[in-house]
Image (cartoon, helix red, strand yellow):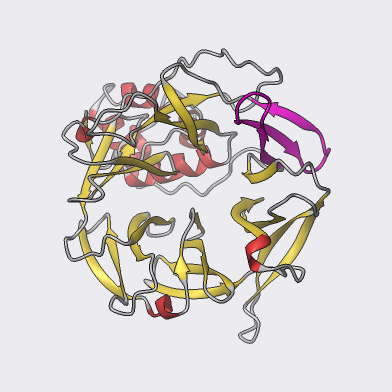
Amino acid sequence: MAFQNSINYDKEEECSIIIGDLPKDVVVQILFRLPVRDLLRFRSVCKSWYNFLKSPNFIKLHTAHQISRPASTIIAYNRGNHTYLWPNLFLLHLQPVICNIEQDNFTINHQLPLPSAIDDAEDYTNFKFCYNGLICLIKDMYTSPVVILWNPATRRYKCIKIPSECSKFTYLKLGYHQQSNDYKILQVPSHNDESSKMAWVYTLSLGSWKTVPFTLLSRTVSFGSQISLNGFVYWPASGTEAYIICFDVIKDEFKLLDVPDDRGFDILRICRRLTVLRGSLAMIVSIVDGSWDTEIWTLVNRSSSLQPYSWTKKFIIEPFSKETIPVGMWNADKLLVEVLKTDNALKQVYFNYDLVTKEMNYFHVPKKQGLASLMMCECYFESLELEDGFGQRY
């Protein structure tokens, strides 16, 4: 289905994008489909094109269009021959999504040059997550931590120093609200420490940090990866029971969500992973030893104040094997699974499982000499984020 969105421009913007007799909406739809490198070149055409392609409105709609297209792959490796200064420095690569033939000697041709901001790192530099074409790194995490929001497509990045008052025992999260077109960085307590009941929030448009109450700390310990969706950030947490922590990006408020039914298994035997399925928050629930079915549930928001949400079971997947671990959703109805092979040495192999056709295809994760274990594999698409004045180029 073609991307559709309301396009509202003032008269100056409307005139700036006219090409011959083509209607402005047609021109905009063409621009949405062009690679970022071409859009950056088109800014040199004239001042009006420069202003239009750099406008927050166009960047926002361009990002929305990119989300609707098939994603590429970010591969993050741990450097094998690491130096003393960067023992956990990750190398990032762009790769096609699927390859049908297993090739261990595949060459990585798209290594991404890391931003120059990490050159002066005195401590660890870590890859955290990828969202809306932005990659989040954190350097000097144990001394003077600095968050780096980095757009590899435009070669722009922004360094954000974490306040010294912020506890080192925190998890980093990133939220986005489409209506306000703004990002927020969260530093959330990771330990059940009664002495700290505050979270730190950085608003990109304001360029400043503030604290907000985090009263859930006495009941939960937050952990794991995040999902940013529809103005909320979600991540798993645990206490005496399992929960999901939800952060409202606009209201700066936290709340707890229950998890789907655990089928009576001990909490230590359940493996839960948050993901996105067909535009909704979803949770993959599996048993650690792979001996039972894997279930995929989606969160349904309701208008009732007594029951504001509920979980609906969408898929039941028969066990693959005891060595198979579901990782997350990958482009529409594709489930990425990891298989641990122990022929001569332990290695990770990935497969792409189609929830509709139930077909399994090999998912190619390339190897490169000099790199150690694969650390992360995430969806990625190009965007123009940070091109509206929030980042510097390298």
Is residue 350 covered in magenta?
A: yes
Is residue 81 covered in magenta?
A: no
Q: Residue furthest bottom?
A: 306
Residue 28 is left or right of residue 164, and the answer is: right
Q: Residue furthest front?
A: 344
Task: Determine the main secondary structure of the stretch shown in magenta.
Answer: strand
User: Horizontal and vertical percent for residue 242?
Assistant: 58, 70
State the residue at coordinates (78%, 41%). Answer: 321
Of the pair 16 and 368, the residue shown nearer to us: 368
User: Horizontal and vertical percent for residue 167?
Assistant: 25, 64
> In this orientation, does residue 23 appear?
no
Q: Is residue 361 above or below residue 258?
A: above
Give the magenta-colored segment's residue range. Answer: 334-363
Of the pair 71 and 337, the residue shown nearer to us: 337
State the residue at coordinates (16%, 61%). Answer: 164
User: Horizontal and vertical percent for residue 239?
Assistant: 52, 74
> How many labels were placed on the picture?
0
Of the pair 107 and 385, the residue shown nearer to us: 107
Of the pair 271 and 312, the residue shown nearer to us: 271
Q: Which image quarter holds the C terminus? A: top left
User: Horizontal and vertical percent for residue 245?
Assistant: 49, 69
State the residue at coordinates (76%, 71%). Answer: 264
Locate residue 349: give its quadrant.
Answer: top right
Q: Is residue 117 above or below residue 311?
A: above
Q: Is residue 198 above or below residue 319?
A: below
Q: Which image quarter holds the N terminus? A: top right
Residue 191 is left or right of residue 363, and the answer is: left
> In this orientation, does residue 287 appear?
yes
State the residue at coordinates (35%, 55%). Answer: 183
Residue 224 is left or right of residue 304, and the answer is: left
Locate residue 221: give its quadrant.
Answer: bottom left
